[in-house]
Amino acid sequence: MKTSLMKTLAQSALATALATGFAMTALAADLKVGLSVSLSGPNSSLGVPYAKGMQAALAYKPEVNGRKIQLIVLDDGSDPTAAGRNARKLVEEEKVDVLMGTSGVPAAIAMAQVGRDAKVPMIGLTPIQLDPAENGWVFTVAQPTQLMIDAVVERMKKDGVKTVGYIGFSDAWGDLVYNALMKAAPAAGIKVLGNERYARADASVTGQVLKLVAMRPDAVMTGGAGTPGALPFLALAERGFKGPVYGQHGLINPDFVRVVGASGQGATMPTGPVIVAEQLPAAYPTKKVAMDFRAAFQKVNNAPTSDAYSAYSFDAWLVFADAAARAKGEPGTPEFRQSLRDAIASTKEVVGTHGVYNFKPGNLYGVDERARVIVKLENGQWKLAN
């Protein structure tokens, strides 16, 4: 009788344990990532790679601590106002735990404001220029513009450039590049000539380029991004400009290469090391992760990656996953989002494709010099510069 009772109690205890386990599984809420990018409009040459890179990241790491990650993607149509609306929808209706995006600095700033006000952490994919003291919920995996332009100016000095003309977008990105150039150039003994601007939707920059060429600069620095960023290169080639033309990391994508064609031959610009992963030394800190990313992207998208943007998405996912594994509380709650924000802000040595990430409170950016290399466009291919 005693043996039978003990057996019954043991079975009951097992059933209770199993039931408790199932209940815990049911209560383990999915983590929600809200991504707003430009899948249409002039910034789609950036936004589509962002989305594809995020799909590769989801396949590479689909869960954290047993919780599956749900990815929700919205198109902002290359419109900053729409990006802000998307962010509100993702926060208020989808109840996401983190925001990610988008395909341009103005739109990213619009999203960041929503994240700040709603107290939902945001990992930006572009260089966001905001006051960290007022935007403690915002981080970005992109390289700081100054870090990248400093590398360009160092290259200009090495190339013997004494004067450089500037042409860039008439928006926040154009301002970021120009301001970084103006900060770095004087110390290198380089004088900046002109400050020509154009809109992302413009079809021609002939007038602006004529003004620059008339100033007779040794070189030209461009502050565009995506396919619209090719316009200055095309116009300078049409006018027979023979000096070097420099760009920045906003131009590293296959659509730019396709549109610029032969006019981009020899263009020099900084980028994250993932673009030339195969050309990096074996001991380079990001090489292994970069090659893992290449494999994951190929498997998910059935095509190779040759842009920088999809890799930013991948890195944002790695930063988020690392922080989510350390965050406390139930996903979907204010407590979890606060803990997730704090975890992102304490990220230490997370190796990505573009760089090694170390965040701290009061700093939007998490990378250092390991996140930049100089490349040249040679016969339609990016080559690591000496």
Image (spheres, helix red, strand yellow):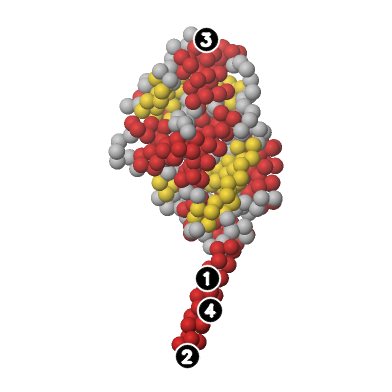
Disc on the earlier residue, 2 or 4: 2
Check the image and report above or below for 316 versus 65.
above
Q: CA distance from mark 3 to mark 1?
A: 73 Å
Q: Which disc number belongs to residue 238?
A: 3
Q: Is residue 110 visible?
A: no
Q: Position of residue 51 (x, y in %)?
A: 55, 37
**Residue receiving disc 4:** 12
Q: Nearer the viewer, residue 301 or 39?
A: 301
Number of the front mark, 2 or 4: 2
The picture quadrant where one finds residue 271 is top left
Amino acid type, label 3: Glu
Look at the numbered disc 4 and give the secondary structure of its residue. Answer: helix
Indicate which disc, 4 or 1, sits on the residue closer to the N terminus.
4
- Evaluate if marks 3 and 1 touch, with contact meaning CB atoms under 8 Å apart: no
Query: Quick one: SS at disc 3?
Result: helix
Horizontally, residue 53 falls left or right of residue 332, namely: left
Residue type, mark 2 in image = Lys
Q: Residue at position x 69%, y 37% from top?
A: 81
Query: Which of the two residues, 371 or 44, is positioned nearer the viewer here?
Result: 44
**Label 4 to label 1, Cα distance in Å?**
10 Å
Q: Amino acid at mark 4?
A: Ser
Q: Which mark is residue 2?
A: 2
Q: Residues under labels 2 and 3: Cα distance? A: 97 Å
